[in-house]
Structures are given as structure tokens and as C-alpha cells.
Amino acid sequence: MSAVSGLLGLACRAGQIALGADTALQEIRAGKAALVLLDAGASEGTRKKLLDACAFRSVPVYTLPENEISQACGRDGRMAAAVRKGNLAKRMQELLSDYESNQTK
């Protein structure tokens, strides 16, 4: 996951991430989100709100270990992030897909 954390931090510094559940939801609804990251410790309400929006708009969702989003971006208490469309999002999605496929083996 360190490669994903590194890309997440880079995306934050590049302004390619919408941090926080409400801001992520706005990005999803606007059609700007390439993928959504959820913290494993996110509440059920936050999880449901984002999962429903992502399912409606066919945006992939990945769950990261607790506090990984906050640590990578340097902001405490962030439970969700929407990664805007672009090359960073594509690379992050590749890494996350590889990570998930290795976990299911």
C-alpha cells in the first residue's frame, strides 16, 4: 500500500483530490471523480452515501486501511477522497486493482 499512499500524497499536493465525504460527493455528482477512496473506519452513513452515488455513476470505490487517507494527505479525520480524472487516477486505480487481486488469492 505504500505505493498507493505515495500517489495519494502526490495527488493531494497536485490538487487532484477532493478530501472529505461531502466534497467527494460533490465531485462524484459533477462527474469529475475517476475513483473514490474510503477509510476502513468510515461510518455506515458516510459509506452508504458515497457507495450509492458511486454505484449510480459507475465510479469505482476502494477501501483503504484506517487513517491512510489522512496520513497520506496530511489532514486529520478524512474518511473519504475522490480522485479527479487524469493520469494519477489511472495509475492509482491500476495499483489498487493489483492490490485487491493479490488479496483475493
Image (cartoon, rainbow, N blue to C red):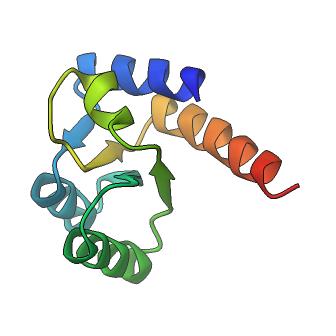
Q: Position of residue 2 (x, y in %)?
A: 56, 21
Q: Quadrant of the N terminus?
A: top right
Residue extending furthest left?
22
Question: Could you tell me which residue is drawn at 39 percent across and 75 percent down?
Answer: 57
- Residue 13: quarter of image: top left
Residue 17 vs 35, above or below: the answer is above
Q: Position of residue 32 (x, y in %)?
A: 29, 53
Percent x, y of residue 30: 20, 63
Q: Residue at x 35, y 20 (%)?
A: 9
The image shows residue 71, relative to residue 93, as above or below, that is: above
- In percent of the image, x 32 and y 37: which residue is there? 67
Above or below, 23 relative to 4: below
Q: Is residue 4 left or right of residue 68?
A: right
Q: How many marks?
A: 0
Residue 39 in the figure: left or right of residue 43: right
Q: Residue at x 30, y 79 (%)?
A: 48
> Is 50 positioned to the left or the right of 63 in the image?
left
Rendered-image quadrant of the C terminus: bottom right
**Image quadrant where residue 96 sits:** top right
Q: Residue 45: where, in percent of width, then height?
A: 20, 77
Left or right, 43 with reference to 72: left
